[in-house]
């Protein structure tokens, strides 16, 4: 009887041990899948950014940074799940693409940015710039990008973002001005000047653009003064006509 009880206890212990080992393995697999999924999300996000770079001026250095980011994520996936199907071929492809982008970064000059007229395209460009700046900051924070390169590329993206915002405000102000909506035009221009003045990096563009917009504001101010003067004169004339009508000699019937 004691032997049977001992065997039952031993069996229970074995079952508990096996379950514990199985749960531990399952947890490890879940952790591995979660880590791999995180790296895949980085790759997918980076590939989308690379595609959206077509809306921006050619910037081989940023392409190189993004390609390296994708490659690092793929290598991390290979370490997490070495048996993952196709991962080695993917890494080889990314290494070749990175090598090509490094060559371009050392040779190609950047394009001049031309502001598109399409509002939807402007929105896509602004969203891409914001994501790029966040990505570069993340890469610099984890040591994958040196501080000097980060500052250089981030300032270029910041300047592009500023120019889009300012030119959009200026365009709307000009449209309102053309329709003689002087109050709205002044608001757009004043917002543009405030944005330019408060920007931490003052450049030739910010200085010249502020002067250009200030000239437009002065034209609006003069137009409003003339309009107010004309309105006042018109009102005075109307009041004078009313008085003349009130005090004119009465006719005898």
Image (spheres, helix red, strand yellow):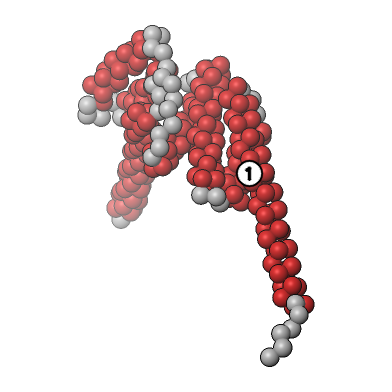
Residue position marked by numbered label 1 in the rendering: 220
Query: Is 130 positioned to the left or the right of 66 in the image?
Result: right
Q: Position of residue 63 (x, y in %)?
A: 38, 21
Q: Residue at x 41, y 13 (%)?
A: 109
Residue situated in front as seen by the camera: 231 or 126: 231
Q: Which residue is at the front of the view, 17 or 229? A: 229
Quadrant in which the N terminus appears: bottom left
Which quarter of the picture shows residue 234? bottom right
Please provide percent x and percent y for residue 229: 70, 53
Q: What residue do we see at 71% from left, 58% from top?
A: 233
At mark 1, the secondary structure is helix
* Spot occupied by residue 80 in the image (x, y as percentages of width and height): 35, 29
Return the residue found at the far bottom: 253
Q: Is residue 88 left or right of residue 159?
A: left
Q: Is residue 38 visible?
A: no
* Residue 72 vs residue 13, the one in the foreground: 72
In the drawing, does residue 37 fall left or right of residue 92?
right
Which quarter of the image is occupied by the C terminus?
bottom right
Provide residue 88's location: percent of width, then percent of height. Answer: 25, 21
Within the image, what quadrant is residue 79 found in?
A: top left
Q: Residues within 10 Å of mark 1 (few under 14, many from 20)?
A: many
Q: Nearer the viewer, residue 192 or 221?
A: 221
Query: Outermost residue toward the front?
Result: 252
How many badges with numbers are in the image? 1
Residue at 60% over, 31% down: 212
Question: Looking at the image, can residue 248 be seen?
Answer: yes
Q: Is residue 33 above or below residue 114?
A: below
């Amino acid at each position: 009887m004691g032997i049977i009880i001992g065997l039952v206890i031993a069996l229970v212990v074995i079952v508990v041990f096996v379950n514990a080992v199985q749960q531990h393995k399952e947890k490890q697999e879940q952790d591995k899948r979660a880590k791999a999924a995180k790296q895949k999300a980085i790759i997918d996000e980076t590939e989308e950014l690379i595609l959206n770079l077509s809306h921006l001026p050619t910037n081989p250095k940023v392409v190189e940074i993004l390609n390296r980011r994708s490659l690092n994520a793929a290598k991390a996936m290979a370490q997490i799940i070495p048996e993952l199907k196709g991962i080695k071929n993917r890494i080889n492809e990314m290494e070749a693409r990175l090598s090509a982008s490094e060559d371009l970064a050392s040779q190609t000059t950047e394009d001049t940015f031309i502001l598109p007229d399409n509002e939807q395209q402007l929105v896509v460009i602004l969203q891409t710039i914001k994501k790029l700046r966040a990505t570069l900051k993340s890469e610099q924070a984890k040591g994958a990008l040196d501080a000097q390169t980060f500052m250089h590329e981030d300032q270029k993206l910041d300047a592009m973002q500023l120019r889009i915002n300012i030119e959009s405000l200026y365009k709307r102000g000009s449209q309102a001005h053309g329709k003689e909506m002087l109050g709205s035009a002044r608001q757009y221009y004043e917002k543009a000047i405030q944005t330019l003045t408060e920007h931490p990096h003052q450049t030739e563009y910010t200085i010249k653009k502020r002067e250009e917009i200030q000239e437009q504001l002065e034209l609006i101010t003069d137009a409003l003064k003339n309009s107010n003067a004309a309105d006042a004169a018109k009102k005075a004339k109307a009041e004078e006509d009313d008085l003349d009508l009130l005090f004119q000699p009465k006719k005898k019937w």
